[in-house]
Amino acid sequence: MNTNAIDFDRYDRIRPIRWTGQALELLDQRKLPFVVEYVTCADSDAVAEAIHALTVRGAPAIGIAAAWGVVLASRTVEANDGRDAAARLEPALQRLNAARPTAVNLAWALARMRRALAAAGADWREVLEREAQAIADEDLAANRRMGALGAALIPPGSGVLTHCNTGSLATAGFGTALGVIRAGVAEGRIDKVFAGETRPWLQGARLTVWELQQDGISPTLIADSAASHLMRSGDVQWVVVGADRICANGDTANKIGTYQLAIAARHHGLKFMVVAPSSTVDMETPSGDAIHIEERDPGELFAVGGVRTAADEIGAWNPVFDVTPHELIDAIVTERGVIERPDEAAMKAAFG
Ligand code: MRU
């Protein structure tokens, strides 16, 4: 496994989160692919709102954005040391934490900021800024390592199907599942990349195919409902997805529709890979049954691009994540290594 073999500059051009020293700039993912525009968050509540509104989205990216939100909050309080500051900052941290419930990276990043603060002295503001930068830098490094580890599982000449957006847009850069796909293409292992539209928010159609296009990779977009038919055709060998929370038994929450892909992959004899940094692993949650699945405004189902497509005055149910049971997962790839056929024992061996 050699991460140096991949030309990262060629295969990774987009950065969704920019820290200016005074404010946080977020690439507005609600407007992509037709408008490429950064919004500026000058305080932590603006960051919380941006996370809730999906201006920034993707599990690692919302953790990184929240960490910078804490840095912004630190500019508004006076304190002598980290412990003193921690008490004053806690309400802002709680509001950031409440922005979205399913991706554990958000709570993980805030817990890490709290720990840094608890150990800090008079320089607590600089400590927080260094910690936020470290969270972002470590995420990029983890993604590059996972790219190489995951790609090594894919035989040359393969086709892959991915879901949602797990790329640079969802992380500090390079991506998780999309990082594996970038590495697999660069190494000549992946010949064909299929991306599901990912209804209702269309992360696949609006973000993934656009992001791959920027890197000179030509993806094929499919309707989510075409996945089983594609699998039957023999054109894909692996389904490669990201994660929002991986439980102590390997059960994995990810974008709604992932579970049905895993069932269909098993039926067709395809392999199913979950790619996520260790910041997505939640050993405190025993199984998928205990995960809080976010439900969003049913209005997201009534319209496409602002044009109503559903009949008037109907109800809708809009859970935006589902849980893939660990029995359907062939490999979980983190920066710490590959866990094949994950279960409670294998997870415990890897993450304690
Ligand atoms: O609702 P989103 O767009 O934040 O959901 C994103 C996903 O489900 C991703 O697959 C997951 O966060 C991993 S991103 C590297």
Image (cartoon, grey):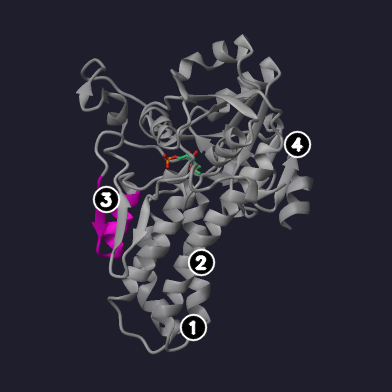
Region in magenta: 37-51
- Residue 136 image position (x, y, % from top left): 48, 60
The residue identified by callout 3 is 38
**Secondary structure state at the residue bearing disc 4:** loop
The residue identified by callout 4 is 341
Earlier residue among tags 2 and 4: 2
Between 44 and 194, the one lying in front of the other is 194
Residue 215 appears in the rendering = yes
- Tell whether circle 3 marks a residue whose Cβ is less than 8 angstroms from ligand 1: no
- Tell whether circle 1 marks a residue whose Cβ is less than 8 angstroms from ligand 1: no
- Residue 27 image position (x, y, % from top left): 31, 48
**Real-space Cα separation, disc 2 to disc 3, in angstroms:** 22 Å
In the image, taking residue 305 as reference, residue 295 lies left or right, namely right
Pointer 4 and pointer 3: residues touching (CB < 8 Å)? no
The residue identified by callout 2 is 134
> Is 256 placed above or below 167 here?
above
Pointer 1 and pointer 4: residues touching (CB < 8 Å)? no
Pointer 2 and pointer 4: residues touching (CB < 8 Å)? no
- 38 part of magenta stretch: yes
Other residues around mark 3 within 10 Å, as few (<14) / some (14–19) / many (≥20): some
**Real-space Cα separation, disc 1 to disc 2, in angstroms:** 16 Å
In the image, taking residue 219 as reference, residue 207 lies left or right, namely left
**Secondary structure state at the residue bearing disc 2:** helix
